[in-house]
Image (spheres, helix red, strand yellow):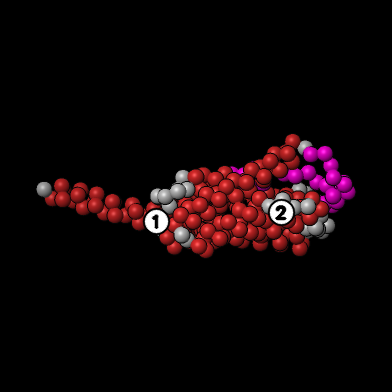
Amino acid sequence: MTAHIGNDAATATSTVAAPGTRRVSTRRLAVAAALAGPLFYGSAVAQMLTRPGFDLRVHPISQLSTGALGWIQITTFVLTGLGMIALAIVHRRVVVDGLGRRAAPLFIGIFGAGLIAAGLFTMDPQLGFPAGAPEGVVPMSWHSVVHSTAAVLAFTALAVACIVLLVRDIRRRALWPAIGNGVTALVLLLPGPPEFASVQIALTGLVAFTWTTVVALRLRRAA
């Protein structure tokens, strides 16, 4: 009798503890996701200011992955991508009903995976960076093609996630989240002149990672 009561108590305690443990892990993942964007741009800005020859008007941020110190930006890409996958997991756990509950985290996860691939497959040294690189544009190597393709797919996937959540928020009559999702999707899909491509990519990324940070913090509160 005593043993039976003890087993029932242990089962009840485990049942109560499990949701609490899941909630804590979800909130921690949300914090990691919220920090991913600031990590990316903090690292990028620090490298822009300290690596000789880098000029954002000419070189995209991805060019920081080349050269002897390229491992810093490669690591930054990978950690940021993992943060975005964490955001997808949080979204899947917290948003359990309504439009986009499955599609949004799927496309956010693709965004994260694309960032990891873009980090692992680097651009080619060119346009005089890093030091000793050819001054002009060089023919794209296979890994540079993979990098560019992964980056395009990643940000396109994030734009799709924003559109899905835009429709969801319109249906919920959530004005400000809908505006944020709409503006972010527009910025991600907006074409620009090739001569300003590096700056536009940097600004687009800034908007994208601001969006992911805001969404992560909102989901953390909901968790």
State the residue position of label 1: 23
> How would you rate the neighbour count of disc 2 (Cα within 10 Å): few for under 14, some for 14-19, many for 20 or more?
some
Name the side, left or right, on which 200 lies relative to 6: right
Across and down, in percent, residue 75 comes to 65, 50
State the residue position of label 2: 201
Name the side, left or right, on which 41 lies relative to 102: right
Residue closest to the eye, 101 or 57: 101
- Which residue is rendered at x = 61% and y = 58% of the image? 183
If you read the primary sequence from the N terminus, does the residue marked by circle 2 or circle 1 appear first?
1
- Which residue is rendered at x = 11% and y = 48% of the image? 1
Name the side, left or right, on which 197 lies relative to 167: right
How many marks can you see?
A: 2
- Mark 1: which amino acid? Arg
Name the side, left or right, on which 33 lies relative to 95: right
Secondary structure under the numbered disc 1 in the rendered image:
helix
Across and down, in percent, residue 208 comes to 62, 56
Instruction: Please tell me whether residue 122 belongs to the stretch shown in magenta.
Output: yes
Across and down, in percent, residue 169 comes to 48, 56
- Mark 2: which amino acid? Ile
Q: Residue furthest top?
A: 142
Residue 139 in view here: yes
Instruction: Please tell me whether residue 123 belongs to the stretch shown in magenta.
Output: yes
Q: Are marks 2 and 1 in contact (CB under 8 Å)?
A: no
- Which residue is rendered at x = 85% and y = 45% of the image? 137
Residue 121 in view here: no
Quarter the C terminus occupies: bottom left
- Which residue is rendered at x = 19% and y = 49% of the image? 8
| Marks 2 and 1, how far apart at CA | 35 Å
Across and down, in percent, residue 5 comes to 16, 50
Residue range in magenta is: 112-140
